[in-house]
Image (cartoon, rainbow, N blue to C red):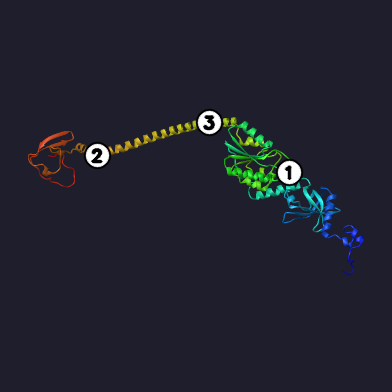
Amino acid sequence: MPGRPAHPGPAAASAPPGGSPEAALDVHALTTAAKELVEGAFPPLWVRGEVSDFKAHRNGHWYFQLRDQEAQLRCVVWSAAARRLPAPPDDGMQVVALGQMTVWPVRGDLQFSIRQLEAAGDGLWRKALEQTRRRLEADGLLDPARRRPLPRFPRCLAVITSPDGAAMHDVISVARARSPEVQLVVVPAKVQGEGAAESLVAALERVYRWGGADALIIGRGGGAREDLWAFNDERLARVLAASPIPTVSAVGHEVDVTICDLVADVRAPTPSAAAELAVPARREVAARVAALASRLAGAAQRHEQRAGAALRQVRRVLVQQSVRVVEQRGARLGALAGQLEALSPLATLHRGFSVARSPEGATLKRRDQFPDGVPFTLWLHDGIVDAVATGSRPRPDRSPGPPPEEHG
């Protein structure tokens, strides 16, 4: 080729890579070498700065700039590291980041690959917590009205915690001291670190599928904010809120408040306090039973007194009504007696009338019933007269009027 020697000369053959046109490096080799050189020169270190131009890629990576008054540094948080952080930073947020200076060979960009990120104070943690809280509140999961009371006399309690932590031993010892009859079923779960939230969700779902517990306690002992962070996981909070049985959240110490505390039916300041809330003490149960028995006896006595008073009142009312009924019936009976007296044949006889009867006792009312020589009796108001018919004749006057006093 014109302008180029057919064979490299001795100088070209001895030149280092990139030291001559003949020993030129390709771009990828140079950027790769720069990457190795930069990473070798800078160990992982913490850098302080202000976040700007934050962008979250759909593949999960975060890109932004860290800057101060005099310089700026291109930064990247790969998706694997981003998943371990509580929340993405906001533009203008002051942060400190642990990372490694490197070069991206594809573009030759110098960048800072971040592994850990902390905002000034607890900004990222507080932001993540507030975002989760707002989403749960919008769905009504933080409404106090949905909280259920714990069963007064549980037979079986599920306890979700680490099998190696002090929380499990605290719950067992307190529960056994209060009521040995209550059965405790420990469902082991990871309570901190990578995969802790998933492990807690799996433990909850096991308890739900089993269905043998009257209530459940979920929690762990105290620790740093990062150690308790699994209990702020949104999916865990939603699964806990969907529990078919009452729940007690006991995470850390009294000053530690997590999302699980907000969605549980009862929040206990410590695991020991959770056991006290969920398991009634035997002496307390006995005292309650005695109090209930006393109340029942008092209620029965009061009921008996009220029933006796009501019975006496009913008796008085019945007596008064009976007297009125008897008086009313007596008056009516007297009236009926007067009517009967007025209609009685004996009363008619007292007014001067008489009644003729045959020897058989039949009343003789017509003239043709008195043939000559037939004996009959004549009933008067003061006695009976025996008589014999000697003849009969019609009445001379048939107009209405009093009958004659004598009859025969």
Q: Residue 226: which numbered mark, if any?
A: 1
Q: Amino acid at mark 3?
A: Ala
| Element class at badge 3 | helix
- Which residue is at a point 83% across and 57% down the rendered structure image? 31
- Which residue is at a point 62% across and 45% down the rendered structure image? 241
Q: Place residue 225 in its image quadrant.
A: top right
Horizontal and vertical percent position of residue 13: 90, 60
Tell us which disc is closer to us: 1 or 3. Answer: 1
- In the picture of the structure, the residue carrying the numbered disc 2 is 342
Pick the front one: 28 or 67: 28
How much space separates mark 2 and mark 3, taking CA atoms? 71 Å
Does residue 391 appear left or right of residue 266 in this picture? left
| Residue 328 seen in render | yes
Does residue 400 appear left or right of residue 388 in this picture? right
Q: Residue 293: which numbered mark, if any?
A: 3
Q: Amino acid at mark 2?
A: Ala
